[in-house]
Image (cartoon, rainbow, N blue to C red):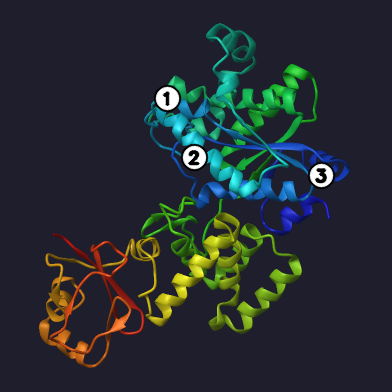
């Protein structure tokens, strides 16, 4: 199957600069293609992952991905998708972020079969006069103003710095075309203007029509809201920001209306496997087999087998209520955003802890729930209202973990 046919089946194609030409090109030979990311932070989130899933599919289909870490463009700021100017980061912060993203890319793409570059290496070598004479002369201001990313900012204002971003990204494509024979750039739908500028620059400078662009649709949930955000904020690929358990749960909790779309987009399962899971969703949605498979596949891809096993271990422990064997790291990851209050004693009566920690509204209700066996403390059921409780032994004296009923967890912080 031509890789473009697969991408269309997976719902991953939005716009192409030359649909017929690109289809023929990738059907005839292995090509080099690229996608870039600016180091605006020290970790990608799942929104960033979207175009790189496509890059990975090209890699698996025998093509050669080139990943561009935008050490140069990241110091300028991409205006795409923003209503206001970015705050410029220090050179040290950009360098640190670039190193972090480089390590994440290596985990996703392996040790070989791809090339990783930093556009600071060439953009920093271009003098102002060379920039204006060699590149600026080839860009028409009227055309640049008409690009959506710029036009949307004309009312509120855009600096020359961010206005020039599209030229820098075009230079990236030209440099990669020359050095690595890169013929295709992919990106999100908001990158269409930047991508087409790069294609046009290559045509003007090389008088060739063998460079292409492809964008991916904006991903929305069934309720119309943007994919990737949760009540707790972004879902990060860095396990220190979003634990493997939290990452797993994000995917497991997807709506039945969205899960098949995400299986197509974020997993490498075959059409036959996904069709079977789609039938499962229609006939037995209560089993949540499609969501479980989605969570397994994406967690394994991002965090490896060890991360998946940790996520499944924590999930099972929380489901059963037996959390006494969880490590401090696993507890932190599982209860990072769990509701709960504070107490000020290392050892405290269970009834007082439940009220002060926000688990119960009154001591009467607390006593009743304890006596009825509805309360588990650090994984162990407690039915004695006179019992003194303390922190989970693996949290360095910091947290008491309470389970009330079948699935309500509270994390009470001990403030000394």
Q: Nearer the viewer, mark 3 or mark 2?
A: 2
In terms of image quadrants, where is residue 64?
top right
| Mark sitting earlier along the chain (3/1) | 3
In terms of image quadrants, where is residue 6?
bottom right
Residue 302 shows in this picture = yes
Q: Nearer the viewer, mark 3 or mark 1?
A: 1
Q: Distance from label 1 to label 2 (Cα)?
A: 14 Å
Which label belongs to residue 91?
1
Locate residue 36, reporting x and y percent: 59, 36
Q: Is residue 346 left or right of residue 8?
A: left
Which label belongs to residue 23?
3
Residue 39 shows in this picture = no
Q: Distance from label 3 to label 2 (Cα)?
A: 35 Å
- The residue that mark 2 highlights is 100
Locate residue 299, reporting x and y percent: 55, 61
Q: Is 152 or 260 nearer to us in this picture? A: 260
Secondary structure beneath dot 2 equals: helix
Locate residue 144, reporting x and y percent: 56, 24
Q: In this picture, is 82 found above or below 2?
A: above
| Mark sitting earlier along the chain (1/2) | 1
Q: Is residue 218 left or right of residue 385?
A: right
Pick out the residue farthest to the bottom. 372
| Mark sitting earlier along the chain (3/2) | 3
């Amino acid at each position: 199957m031509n890789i473009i046919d697969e991408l269309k089946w997976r719902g991953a194609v939005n716009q192409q600069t030359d649909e017929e030409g690109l289809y023929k090109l990738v059907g005839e030979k292995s090509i080099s293609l690229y996608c870039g990311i600016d180091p605006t932070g020290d970790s990608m989130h799942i929104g960033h992952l979207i175009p790189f899933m496509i890059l990975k599919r090209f890699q698996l289909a025998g093509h050669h991905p080139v990943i561009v870490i935008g050490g140069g463009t990241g110091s300028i700021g991409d205006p795409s998708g923003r209503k206001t100017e970015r705050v410029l980061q220090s050179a040290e912060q950009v360098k640190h972020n670039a190193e972090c993203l480089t390590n994440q890319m290596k985990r996703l793409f392996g040790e070989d079969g791809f090339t990783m570059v930093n556009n600071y290496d060439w953009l920093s070598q271009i003098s102002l006069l060379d920039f204006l004479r060699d590149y600026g002369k080839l860009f028409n201001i009227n055309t640049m103003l008409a690009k959506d990313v710029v036009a949307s900012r004309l009312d509120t204002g855009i600096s020359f710095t961010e206005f020039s971003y599209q030229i820098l990204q075009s230079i990236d494509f030209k440099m990669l075309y020359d050095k690595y024979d890169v013929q295709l750039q992919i990106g999100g739908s908001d990158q269409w203007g930047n991508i087409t500028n790069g294609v046009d620059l290559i045509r003007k400078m090389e008088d060739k029509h063998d460079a292409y662009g492809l964008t991916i649709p904006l991903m929305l949930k069934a309720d119309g809201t943007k994919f990737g955000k949760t009540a707790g904020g972004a879902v990060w690929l860095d396990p220190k920001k979003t634990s493997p358990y939290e990452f797993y749960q994000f995917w497991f909790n997807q709506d039945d209306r969205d899960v098949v779309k995400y299986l197509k987009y974020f997993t490498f399962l075959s059409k036959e496997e996904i069709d079977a899971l789609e039938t499962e969703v229609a006939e037995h949605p209560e089993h949540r087999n499609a969501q479980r498979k989605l969570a397994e596949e994406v967690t394994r891809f991002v965090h490896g087998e060890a991360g998946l096993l940790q996520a499944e271990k924590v999930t099972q422990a929380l489901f059963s209520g037996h959390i006494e064997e969880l490590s401090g790291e696993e507890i932190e990851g599982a209860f990072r955003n769990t509701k709960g209050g504070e107490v000020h004693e290392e050892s405290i009566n269970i009834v007082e802890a439940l009220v002060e920690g926000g688990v119960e509204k009154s001591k009467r209700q607390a006593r009743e729930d304890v006596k009825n066996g509805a309360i588990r403390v650090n994984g162990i059921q407690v039915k004695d209202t006179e019992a003194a409780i303390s922190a989970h032994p693996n949290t360095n004296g910091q947290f008491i973990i309470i389970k009330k009923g079948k699935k309500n967890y509270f994390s009470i912080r001990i403030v000394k």
